[in-house]
Image (spheres, rainbow, N blue to C red):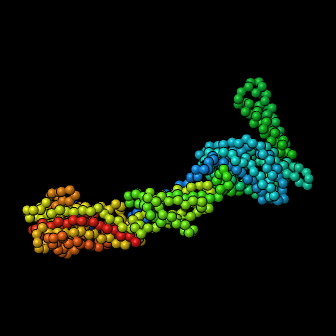
């Protein structure tokens, strides 16, 4: 289709929509988009135009319940600082490699380095387990790097000991692990290494050349330093000396170690005594207003244990074997709530669980006496309106939602009957000419959703009306609604005890 033709059609449709919805009196715009009244004749109760807006599918994140879980150590147990323990293993049973490690560096993800200078002999074969630098305290946090400084390495072969060359005299290991206060982090470092036999003639010749150049550099730097000492020359001299020593030591090595390192990690609670059990303590509150809920049945799905919350909403399960548990909270007046809780040895898991009421009621409203002409009215006007607020935005898309209804009572000042109309909206409909308290009256109104054709109001105790508004509220989600009444008669009427009720399963 030609672009100009398409634009013209679109503008024509848009203009027709604006004309169709633009009439219907002053005051606030119609929030629901149905059944507008013609303000030019307020006594005419007939509808002069219907402007239907498409229903927009809305979804809200109003949850049925919410939970917060925190872990802490029992009061009788002192939580220690985070510790690290390393276990070095080898997957080889055929080689007996000995490492002399002089220090270890550990780096966290923020770049901080922690160095431990402690010499240890590590045997790398599948029949031994070496614990290195056990139970060192480190700040809690996340780490990703470990480095070992190797002073020397050797292998026993046919009763003879041979040197093993370690490139750069360091073993490096990268991988993510975490340290937590009150826990010992055990890192299992598995060496899947290879030993490469050095080609002696070529290898030693190459090392001899390296040694020669390193020695020449060392002597040159040393002579210059003795003639004119400086920090730069001292550094060059030390660097050349280290290269010379490394080349000299390497010439006696038969093998070169090529390590492949795999890292495993587990957290173990640090406790002063052997404890295998923990506790759950909790509090149950109303999701709407946060008040504690008593007499809520709390059970553990995997065990036949049930307790009731006390007057403050608290409950406790003691001496549970360490593990993961699913607790369920049940009460006829609230929707079931559940959560999964990890229980650690010697720890207390604190949980705050919120429950959604199965029935939610709005505030109660009333209009007082009103009519357009009758002199006994509190406020003269064709229309009267009041607001109704729910404590939460209703979750209409939840599977637990069943229905919504509005209930109100209508009275007439004099004996006889009167006709009035009631309208529900998610925004104010009446342009107030007068107001008393939380209700107001006026002669200009944008009608919302009509709740019925005719209502009869008697002069004694009035008549109570109950109207199902499930679909109306689902199409117009909000947490505040307005009920407007239109008095068709000249005698005063009063709408009271107005309340919206939301029902869940």
Instruction: Please count the marks in the image.
Output: 0
Residue 243 versus residue 325 in the image, above or below: above
53 sits left or right of 257 in the view:
left
List the single residue furthest toward the bottom: 453
List the single residue furthest toward the top: 227
Q: Position of residue 154 (x, y in %)?
A: 84, 49
Image quarter of the N terminus: bottom left
Q: Position of residue 163 (x, y in %)?
A: 85, 48
Q: Position of residue 118 (x, y in %)?
A: 75, 42
Q: Position of residue 211 (x, y in %)?
A: 82, 40
88 sits left or right of 374 in the view:
right
List the single residue furthest toward the front: 311
Residue 331 versus residue 190 in the image, above or below: below
- The residue nearer to you, when weighing 57 against 166, is 57
What residue is shown at x 9% (from left), y 62% (from top)?
376
Q: Quadrant of residue 120?
A: top right
Asked whether residue 188 is in view, the answer is yes
Asked whether residue 39 is in view, the answer is no
What residue is shown at x 43% (from left), y 65% (from top)?
64
- The residue nearer to you, when weighing 354 against 224, is 354
180 sits left or right of 244 in the view:
left
Residue 246 versus residue 31 in the image, above or below: above
What residue is shown at x 38% (from left), y 58% (from top)?
289
Image quarter of the C terminus: bottom left
Q: Quadrant of residue 429?
A: bottom left
What residue is shown at x 85% (from left), y 51% (from top)?
155
- The residue nearer to you, when weighing 124 against 140, is 140
- The residue nearer to you, when weighing 212 against 84, is 84
């Amino acid at each position: 289709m030609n672009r100009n033709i398409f634009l013209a059609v679109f503008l024509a449709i848009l203009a027709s929509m604006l004309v169709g919805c633009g009439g219907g009196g002053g005051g606030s715009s119609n929030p629901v988009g149905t059944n507008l009244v013609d303000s030019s004749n307020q006594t005419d109760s007939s509808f002069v135009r219907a402007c239907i807006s498409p229903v927009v599918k809305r979804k809200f994140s109003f949850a049925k319940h919410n939970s917060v879980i925190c872990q802490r150590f029992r009061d009788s147990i002192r939580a220690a600082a985070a510790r690290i323990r390393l276990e070095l293993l080898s997957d080889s049973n055929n080689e007996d490699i000995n490492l002399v490690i002089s220090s270890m560096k550990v780096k966290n993800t923020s770049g901080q380095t922690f160095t431990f200078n402690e010499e240890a002999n590590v045997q790398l074969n599948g029949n031994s387990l070496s614990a290195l630098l056990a139970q060192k305290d480190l700040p809690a946090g996340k780490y990703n790097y470990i480095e070992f400084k190797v002073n020397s390495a050797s292998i026993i072969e046919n009763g003879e000991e041979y040197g093993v060359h370690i490139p750069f005299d360091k073993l490096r290991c990268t991988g993510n692990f975490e340290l937590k206060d009150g826990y010992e982090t055990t890192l299992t470092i598995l060496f899947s290494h290879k030993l490469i036999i050095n080609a002696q003639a070529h290898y030693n010749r190459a090392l001899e050349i390296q040694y020669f150049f390193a020695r020449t550099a060392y002597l040159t730097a040393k002579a210059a330093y003795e003639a004119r000492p400086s920090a730069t020359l001292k550094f060059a001299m030390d660097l050349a000396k280290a290269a010379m020593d490394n080349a000299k030591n390497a010439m006696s090595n038969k093998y070169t170690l090529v390590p492949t390192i795999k890292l495993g990690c587990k957290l173990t609670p640090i406790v002063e005594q052997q404890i295998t059990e923990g506790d759950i303590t909790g509090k149950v509150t109303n999701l709407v207003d946060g008040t504690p809920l008593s007499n809520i049945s709390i059970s553990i799905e995997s065990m036949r244990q049930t307790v009731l919350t006390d007057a403050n909403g608290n409950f406790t399960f003691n001496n549970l074997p360490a593990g993961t548990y699913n607790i369920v909270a049940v009460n006829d007046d609230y929707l079931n709530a559940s959560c999964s809780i990890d229980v650690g040895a010697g720890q207390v898991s604190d949980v705050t669980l919120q429950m959604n009421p199965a029935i939610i009621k709005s505030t109660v409203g009333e209009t007082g006496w009103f009519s357009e002409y009758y002199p006994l009215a509190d406020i003269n006007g064709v229309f009267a309106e009041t607001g109704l607020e729910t404590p939460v935005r209703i979750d209409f898309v939840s599977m637990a939602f069943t229905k919504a209804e509005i209930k109100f009572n209508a009275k007439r000042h004099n004996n006889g009957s009167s006709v009035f109309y009631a309208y529900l909206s998610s925004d104010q409909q009446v342009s107030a000419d007068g107001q008393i308290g939380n209700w107001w009256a006026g002669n200009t109104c944008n009608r919302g959703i009509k709740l019925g054709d005719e209502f009869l109001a008697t002069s004694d105790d009035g008549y109570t009306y109950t109207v199902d508004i499930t679909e109306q509220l689902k199409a117009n989600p909000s947490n505040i609604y307005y009920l407007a009444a239109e008095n068709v008669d000249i005698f005063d009427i009063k709408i009271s005890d107005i309340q919206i009720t939301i029902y869940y399963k």
